[in-house]
Image (cartoon, rainbow, N blue to C red):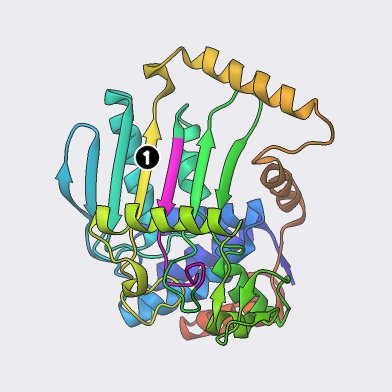
Amino acid sequence: MNITVEQERSIVLEILDRMGVQKEDAEIVADVTVDADLKGFSSHGIGRFPQYVKGLNLGFITKDQDMEIEKETVSTALINGNHKFGHVVTYRAMELAIEKAHETGVGLVGVHNSNHFGATGYYSDMALMQGMIGIVIANTEPAVAPLGGTKPIIGTNPLAIGIPSNKNYISMDMATSASARGKLLEAARKGEKIPENVALDADGNPTTDPNEALKGSILPFGAHKGYALAFMIEILSGPLVKAAFGTKVTGTAHCDATCTKGDLVMAIDPTKFCDLGEFEENVDDFVEEVKAAGNVLIPGDIEARNVEKHKEEGFKLDDKLFNQLKEISSELSFDLEAFLGEE
């Protein structure tokens, strides 16, 4: 079935309200969830929401704890999220990074004891909407085997960068693996195959079966280049921010364990280097030069198109996901179909 943007937001807010989540936190979770689906990252939108509900029910996502700033300087901070929603913790971390960047030019905030936070690009977008450059990295549960190995040790370790512009939406949000794990989880839920050259099964053989891939490993993108980038992100969002790393990372793909991953968010104020208007004008000139080369897309074009499409057409829920949401709603004593006006 199809639902509108407003209906998706209402479903998330209603469920979280009935589960006792603070309204301000619920609004952030709903906004991040809808934003992912709008941009076409369906594996990180409402399709991931049942995982968060499970985490709440099991106590691995907390709703009453407060975050703590454990260390702080004028340009840096380290946040202990106390296992609140990852969306909320990372949102607050980027707010703090932006605040520090206004003062010193760069704000760098590390996070540990958080949770899965949805799509990484939401948080780098927070910076670009404030006329700043946003950079976000994180590590995840092991999913990628080191080159030459067969055992998953490194996460899919996403990287997002957002650049402010007058005329264009410039945003990159990518896993350092050939596929985000969420896409494999989504394919498994829908009973679909994954592309070739994305993953290996537990015996190290290529597979297009997402269930076998989830038991095995995902390939790094670009062979040694993706592997090297994921390796570095593992350190910057693990040991640097007092989070787990390698096989010690848990709780990002499954909410049946405490989440131990880490995040590192950065905001850069261009005005500390040059005039913002001049910077944005030069960025737009570069985009024009690139697009003049032919039928060319820049990072963010596909997401911008998806936003317009989904605002008009809404989102499609596969039957299994809809039934999961119905079951959650039933346990919270409300009829999802009636709530959506389907009866």
Q: Is residue 95 magenta?
A: no
Q: Is residue 141 magenta?
A: yes
**Residue drawn at x 58%, y 26% as measured from the top left:** 165
Of 241 and 36, nearer the camera is: 241
Quadrant assignment for the N terminus: bottom right
Q: How many marks?
A: 1
Q: Main secondary structure of the magenta part?
A: loop
Nearer to the camera, 205 or 44: 205
Q: Which residue corresponds to mark 1?
A: 266
Q: Position of residue 300 (x, y in %)?
A: 65, 41
The residue segment tinted magenta is: 134-148
Query: Taking 341 as reference, is 70 above or below it?
Result: above
Give the x, y percent position of residue 99: 31, 32
Viewer-proximal residue, 158 or 117?
A: 158
Q: Relative to 73, say whether 22 is above or below.
A: below
Question: Please, is residue 124 above or below residue 74 in the view?
Answer: below
Mark 1: amino acid: Met
SS category of the residue bearing label 1: strand
Image position, residue 36 (x, y; %): 58, 55
Residue drawn at point x = 64 percent, y = 51 percent: 39
Residue 224 can be seen, yes or no: yes
